[in-house]
Amino acid sequence: MKRVLLKLSGEALAGEKHTGFDEATVLGVAGQVKELVDAGIQVGIVIGGGNFWRGRTSEHMDRTKADQIGMLATVMNCIYVSEIFRHVGMETRVLTPFVCGGFAELFTKDLALEYLNRGVVTFFAGGTGHPYFSTDTTTTLRAIEIEADVILLAKAVDGVYDSDPRLNPDAKKFDEISIAEVVDKRLAVMDLTASIMCMENRMPMLVFGLGEPNSIVNTVKGRFTGTKITVA
């Protein structure tokens, strides 16, 4: 595995507080990513914004404006996590699809690949830059653009289930499932747009619980207990 795209849930980074950041959690993630970088693996990262903003269901706000706030939430997350990564000894860059002053650089595929090939952990903030697209879609899009080997999907739940295990104690967990089945069964791995993009572009995923000990490193090294989503 040479290059991976890691998707982190904003809520997972908030820990038990469910909002903002839990620094111990972020430091734990940083230590694991540094282990990957030190082993020569190139890492791109997308972070959701749910620890700051979930305005999509508000009937008092235009959907476009709500999504724009969500995009800015992901920029805040990436800047914070990027700085923690730097603190533990990694070189990082934050790229956005829109001009963000001195906070970030404007995304291009060429620039992203330049940084990744230099071993720089590259954060893809700001979503796609357009409303109506989630950070799931951003994850798939950027993974395809940078030609990642796999998407590492770190979630609050430890894999893919046939129903929500937090609501159904009898929910069945899949050890392996095809992306076609995920789409057909509308399983809540990613939103449908992102799942279809993965299917059409043959982008595999490894889904696991961020809270599991050393979960990111174990997933990359093949020692994980999550769900493998295949493209065959």
Image (spheres, rainbow, N blue to C red):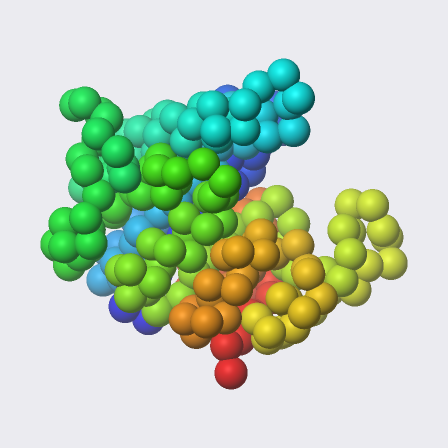
Relative side of 126 to 59, left or right: left
Q: Residue at x 37, y 43 (%)?
A: 128
In the rendered image, residue 188, in percent from the top left (x then y), is placed at 66, 54
Q: Is residue 180 above or below residue 64?
A: below
Relative side of 62 to 1, left or right: right
Residue 77 at least partly seen: no
Residue 9 at least partly seen: yes
Q: Residue at x 27, y 60 (%)?
A: 146
Q: Residue at x 40, y 66 (%)?
A: 150
Q: Residue at x 78, y 51 (%)?
A: 165
In this rendered view, identify the residue nearer to me: 7 or 28: 7
**Which residue is situated farthest in the bottom direction here?**
232
In this rendered view, identify the residue nearer to me: 136 or 62: 62
Quadrant for the N terminus in the image? bottom left
**Which residue is situated farthest in the top direction here?**
60
In the rendered image, residue 23, in percent from the top left (x then y), is placed at 45, 27
Q: Is residue 55 above or below residue 78?
A: above
In the rendered image, residue 205, in percent from the top left (x then y), is placed at 49, 65
Q: Is residue 190 above or below residue 18?
A: below
Count of marks placed on residues: 0
Relative side of 13 to 40, left or right: right
In this rendered view, identify the residue nearer to me: 3 or 179: 179
In the rendered image, residue 143, in percent from the top left (x then y), is placed at 35, 59
